[in-house]
Image (spheres, rainbow, N blue to C red):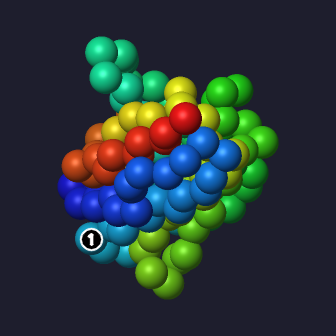
């Protein structure tokens, strides 16, 4: 399976911005879907957003739509999560994941990166 590694987490004040990166261990196939998830302490892991590697509009959860943006760099095998207007409720461990096709389950996961938003 493809290996994924997140980075870019840290401590940021409410209203600030942060960009997370997820680097794949090998080139990502055109049929892949790349997703972002997050898990707050004591909570279940929840979907944040996803994008098809070949293109198309990303999809976001209602809680982050308008504030978060997913982008990709094919040459660097990297997907990004730009987070703006951060709120304390965005505090969580953020994970990236990949699925071989748009219909497949996410079967590869990164180790996670902590994002803490202070109020």
Residue 80 to residue 104: above or below: below
Quarter location, residue 107: top left
Relative depth, front residue between 28 and 96: 96
Relative depth, front residue between 109 and 99: 109
Relative depth, front residue between 49 and 55: 49
Pick out the residue farthest to the front.
119
Where the C terminus falls, by quadrant?
top right
Horizontally, is 66 left or right of 71 in the view?
right
Give the image location of residue 96, x and y in percent: 39, 49
Relative depth, front residue between 7 and 108: 7
Quarter location, residue 6: bottom left
Residue for point 33% across, 67% down: 24
Horizontally, is 109 left or right of 76 in the view?
left
Pick out the residue farthest to the bottom.
75
Residue for point 35% across, 62% down: 7
Give the image location of residue 34, x and y in percent: 48, 51
Quarter location, residue 17: bottom right
In the rendered image, which residue does mark 1 sit on? 25
Residue for point 75% across, 51% down: 57
Residue 61 to residue 1: above or below: above
Q: Are there few (<14), some (14-19), or many (20+) residues within 10 Å of tag 1?
A: few
Residue for point 45% across, 81% down: 76
Horizontally, is 5 left or right of 33 in the view?
left
Give the image location of residue 104, x and y in percent: 43, 37
Instruction: Answer whether residue 22 is visible to the viewer in this image.
Output: no
Instruction: Answer whether residue 20 is visible to the viewer in this image.
Output: yes
Where the N terminus falls, by quadrant?
bottom left
Label 1, secondary structure: give it: loop
How many numbered discs? 1
Give the image location of residue 42, x and y in percent: 30, 15
């Amino acid at each position: 399976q493809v290996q994924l590694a997140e980075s870019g987490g840290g401590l940021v004040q409410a209203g600030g911005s942060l960009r997370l990166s997820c680097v794949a261990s090998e080139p990502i196939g055109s049929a892949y879907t790349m997703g972002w998830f997050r898990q707050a302490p004591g909570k279940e892991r929840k979907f944040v957003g996803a994008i098809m590697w070949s293109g198309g509009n990303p999809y976001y959860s209602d809680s982050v739509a308008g504030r978060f943006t997913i982008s990709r760099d094919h040459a660097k095998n990297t997907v990004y999560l730009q987070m703006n207007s951060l709120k304390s409720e965005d505090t969580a461990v953020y994970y990236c994941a990949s699925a071989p096709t748009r219909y497949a389950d996410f079967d590869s996961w990164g180790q996670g990166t902590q994002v803490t938003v202070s109020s």
